[in-house]
Each structure stands twice: as structure tokens, then as C-alpha cells.
Image (cartoon, helix red, strand yellow):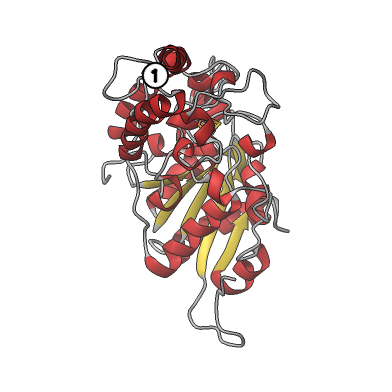
Amino acid sequence: MFKVKKAGKQSRPKSPLLWLGTNTCGGDALSFMNSLDPGYWDVLTDLIDFRYFYLNMTAEGDMATGILDDAMVRWPGKYILVVEGTVPVKSNGLYSVVGWRNGEPLTALQAVQELGAKARHVIAVGTCASFGGPFAASPNPTGSLPVQSVLDNRVINVPGCPVNPDWMMGTLVHLIRFGEPKLDSFGRPLLFYKETIHNQCQRRHYFDNSIFAKQPGEPWCLYKVGCKGPDTFADCPNRQWSGEHLSWPVKANAPCIGCVNPEFPDGNAPFFEHLSDVYLPGTRVTANRVGAITAAATALGIGAHLTGTILTGRLASTYKKGFSGTKKGLKTIGKLMQGLGKKR
Ligand code: SF4
């Protein structure tokens, strides 16, 4: 079990933290509060000085807004700003108002830009804050943007719809105890988003041997019913969910929908249609055709299992280097992210 501090000792001052809710369903805050190790209570008492938490604090109205203003004066360059949700920019940002200041609405856009400019670290929690997610999905009537696109300083993206409690808690603890974790090109901590789900999946041997489920609910590889595991980078198969790490979508016989991906959800829809053809490295054959080739090899007297292993063994090594993705959306968002965050 992770220990935040030695019993009876307050070894260091707690880090001030502000958690803003913008255009969000609130799922990431709820998920975070379900963290078990360390638990939410441990974090409150030993690690973080939670000054503002839109979902879980007693202050409201002017008092709540005053905490935000106060933080910029008392702890410039010292506090951690967490933003959950997109930042809408249409209609002067009035699609998301976090409070009132001097009788005027304080928009999420103002709050994120003012607070972000003076923060020591900025974390975008959840896929909406990180990449736009469902709140920026087409036709995006509010002009919702990810946090990084309205700030010049670097934003650490911790996506997930919702975020896994460990991903957010681990990022926070790492920031406070060891400094900024290593990030990938999308600003995600490599601690949690380094490897594809496909490479860690308990059903990978079914994929390698072309044993595919024909409908959700079947206990085989779910690639053909839409699983986005091959181009989704997260540790769900190993870490799992539900507080005590009990299960994850594929274990529950449902395909991964790629919720941590920059192109989610538009680029991953329809969820139950499989990814465009996945090419096997060193061959001109797509994953769709593995089954056909295996059958042909069997007819020629070559073992189907051996054929599948040869083909997919090459596939596995390429996935280990990082699946490049085949969709336009990923490339577009990749370019967008490269232009954001001047310090990145
Ligand atoms: S396609 Fe999905 S279900 Fe199949 S092995 Fe990959 S991650 Fe697992």
C-alpha cells in the first residue's frame, strides 16, 4: 500500500491545488474520489491543500470565486491547477461560467487563462480537457477547445472518459514528490499511456490466432466488433478499473472504444465497427485477411497455428515500437498538438 507520509509526521507543506470544472459531466472528479491507494482522504490530509474543488467544497458564490483570486496573489507559481472539461470560446466563453466577479460572469476561458498563467503545473484531467472529447464533438456548438489550446504554458494531459483514479492520483503524487513525469507527444504521462491496450490484452492470443468474436459478449478477440485496442495507448488491461482493479471493458466482453485517444469520440465512431485495415508488418496483408491466409496455409499442409504465429509475431514487434495509427483524425490532432504549448 502506498504511504503518503509516516504516521504522526507532517514531513512537508501540502501543495495548494485548485480543481476547476468547466464543460464536463463531472465523471473525472467522481472517479478521482474513488481512488483507493492512496485514498482521497489520505490525499486531503497529507498531500494536497485542496483550496478549491468545484464538486466538493462548502464555499459558494463570492466566497468560492474569492478563493481563486486569492490563490493568484498568495501562491503565484506554486499552486497546481487542475481543469476538468473543455473551454468553450464561442460567444465570449459564456457557454461555461464558473462564477461571478464584480457582478460579471467569470467564464471558464477567463478563469483557465488567468489561473493557468500563474500556476506551477496545469493538469487537464479527462479526455474533454485533454483533447476536446465528447464536449467538442461535432458539431461543437459551444466552440469547445482542450485546455492546452488556450494556454501558452505546458499542460499535462491525463485523458480517459472518465479518467482512471490511478492515472490522476499517480500523476499528482509524481508531480508533488518527484516532479513532472515523462510525457508522450500528446502530453500524457508515459507511466500510464506508454503501451497499446492491444499489446497488454489478455485476449491477444485470440487475435494472433484469428479467433474473433462475431458480436459483443463473446469471449474472443473483439477486434472485428470494433475494439480500438490496437491504436489506444493506456494500461487498462493490467491496471483495470472499479477502484479495486477488478475489470475493464474487454474483460467484460465489450470492445475498447479508445476513450483516451486524441480523436475520441468522432474519430473512433462507430464504436462497433472495426478499425480500418491493420496491415501486418513485412506483408501486404491486413488483419482482416489473416483468417483467410491461415485457412489457405492449412489447405497447403502448413500448420494454421504456425502461419498465424509467423504473421502476427511480426505484427507484435511493430506494435511494441508504437502503432502509428491509420486515421486522418489522429494525424490532424497530432499536428494541432504540436503547435500548442510553446514550452513543449
Ligand atoms: S483487438 Fe481488442 S480484444 Fe482483440 S486482442 Fe486487441 S485489445 Fe484485445
Q: Is residue 181 left or right of residue 83?
A: left
Residue 63 located left or right of residue 257: right
Q: Position of residue 294 (x, y in %)?
A: 44, 18
330, above or below 172, in the image: above
Q: Position of residue 14 (x, y in %)?
A: 52, 72
Q: Quadrant of residue 75?
A: bottom left
The answer, for residue 103, to whether it is visible in the render is no
Q: Position of residue 23 (x, y in %)?
A: 59, 34
Q: Which residue is mark 1?
A: 327
Examine the rendered structure and indicate whether residue 240 appears above or below residue 213.
below
Instruction: In the rendered view, tell whether residue 212 sits above or below residue 154.
Output: above
Residue at image location 46% in from the left, 49% down from the top:
192
Residue 344, picture quadrant = top left
| Residue 218 sits above or below residue 84 on the image | above
Q: Give the image location of residue 252, x and y in percent.
A: 69, 36
Work out which quarter of the rendered image holds the N terminus and state it.
bottom right
Q: Residues within 10 Å of mark 1 (few under 14, many from 20)?
A: some
Q: Residue furthest front?
A: 301
Q: Nearer the viewer, residue 296 or 12?
A: 296
Q: Nearer the viewer, residue 227 or 317?
A: 317
Query: Where, by quadrant of the figure, is residue 272 drawn?
Result: top right
Left or right? Give the position of 82 relative to 162: left
Q: Say which residue appears at 61% left-offset and 85% top-offset.
A: 7
